[in-house]
Amino acid sequence: MECTLGQIVSQRKLTKSLLKQGNTAGKSSITVTAEELSGNDDYVELSFSARKLDDKDFFSKSDPFLEIFRINNDGTESLVHRTETVMNNLSPVWKSFKVSLNTLCSGDHERELKCTVWDWDSNGKHDFIGEFQTTFKELRAEQEGKQWECINPKYQIKKKNYRNSGVVILNHCKIIKMYSFLDYIMGGCQIQFTVAIDFTASNGDPKNSCSLHYIHPYQPNEYLKALVAVGEICQDYDSDKMFPAFGFGALIPPDFKVSHDFAVNFDEDNPECAGIQGVVEAYQNCLPKIQLYGPTNIAPIIQKVASSASEEMHTKEAMEYFILLILTDGVITDMADTREAIVHASHLPMSVIIVGVGNADFTDMQILDGDDGILRSPKGEPVLRDIVQFVPFKDFKHASPAALAKSVLAEVPNQVVDYYNAKGIKPKCMSDFESTRTFSP
């Protein structure tokens, strides 16, 4: 039996017949069930206050701040968080803060945490007030207004009647569940995969063997290699396996006017193709019927997919996430409109993958990727999140299809998670992972 990881996690439980020699199905079958192991991606929101802290200043009250350290396995201490300083106050209330459980305690709820209270001084020589030890297990325990005595060990030794240097109180502890890509996929979220192919004249005459669109009888061209490598991964996360395929930059029948978002199967009412093989066949059938032209405008196709993604956004559920794969051979000519379209799309459940085919200068594509800086619209509006991944095919010309697919799809899982987490949208069909503890002093 052979299958992909995508088939298993998207179906949650996959049953297939075991094949006998000669690839014929036998009477036996195997069932594979997917379950994601719990990681330490969750965050915790904490807030503390203190009462009756020691006064370290002569002419005013102490200016306290709190530091939390994680005690590592080798006994060293790592600073996890430092609160703001509350000026001239012996009973401060510090602002709440968020920290990942990985950072706080390395996912170990019983790992020791050291909390230290200081009196801030402008010269940097802060005065020690006191400290206490705790664990995350203790922090999240259901005890209203949990408090710790803040102890100064020197005073404890020197002063006979010493009790403490004040108390620190936990006001609020809230665990924030960070859902994963698999949580959303296994909760029923479908990946809606759309393909857009560059049919501009710079690709060369498809009848010429030097053309990037030349259909070789024995091996696929670069467009087909990129399409199949990426599409075969994405199709496992789409239950109906129907993929819209569009072309841009060609003169199309019957009137041979230039179009930047025509259906490759020439059915504008239903541009979907059955599986990746259906897209391949539609592409091959389309080539003899069109005339390669220009310019290379990709904003219209981004806007078309964004329109569908916008409808999904209003459902406020994690049901469909859109991935647009653009295959192009050169520099785009509508950069301003494309930047505008991407900034708009960054607010939607959508990602854009651009694969550069051929040996052109793809510098502008790197700008759209946004890895080297924040992409902005011509009006200066920044993208809400990075949704574009650009990969030049020439870097993978001699690599396996899996290597290309891995690079192209590397950022998509995080883009899916970032979108839904930012919107506060939980996976469907999931139990409520979020637990809340709120305390009042």
Image (tube, rainbow, N blue to C red):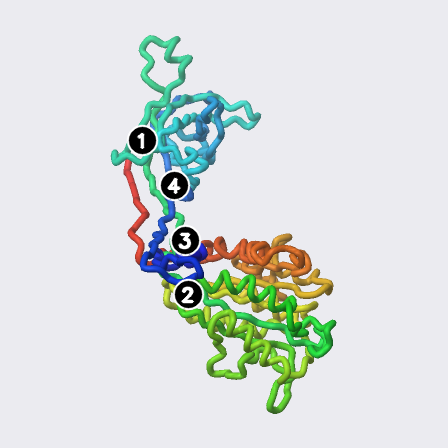
Q: Is 250 rendered above or below residue 29?
A: below
Inter-mark Cα distance, 2 to 4: 29 Å
Q: Is 291 rendered above or below residue 411?
A: below
Q: Nearer the viewer, mark 2 or mark 1?
A: 2
SS label for mark 1: helix
Left or right, 208 with reference to 43:
right
Q: Nearer the viewer, mark 3 or mark 1?
A: 3
Inter-mark Cα distance, 2 to 1: 40 Å
Q: Residues within 10 Å of mark 4 (few under 14, many from 20)?
A: some
Q: Nearer the viewer, mark 2 or mark 4?
A: 2
Q: Nearer the viewer, residue 380 or 58?
A: 380
* Residue, disc 4: 44
Q: Earlier in the sequence, mark 2 or mark 1?
A: 1
| Badge 3 amino acid | Leu
CB contact under 8 Å: marks 2 and 3:
no
| Badge 4 amino acid | Val
* Residue, disc 2: 320
Label number found at residue 182? 3
* Residue, disc 1: 138
| Badge 2 amino acid | Glu
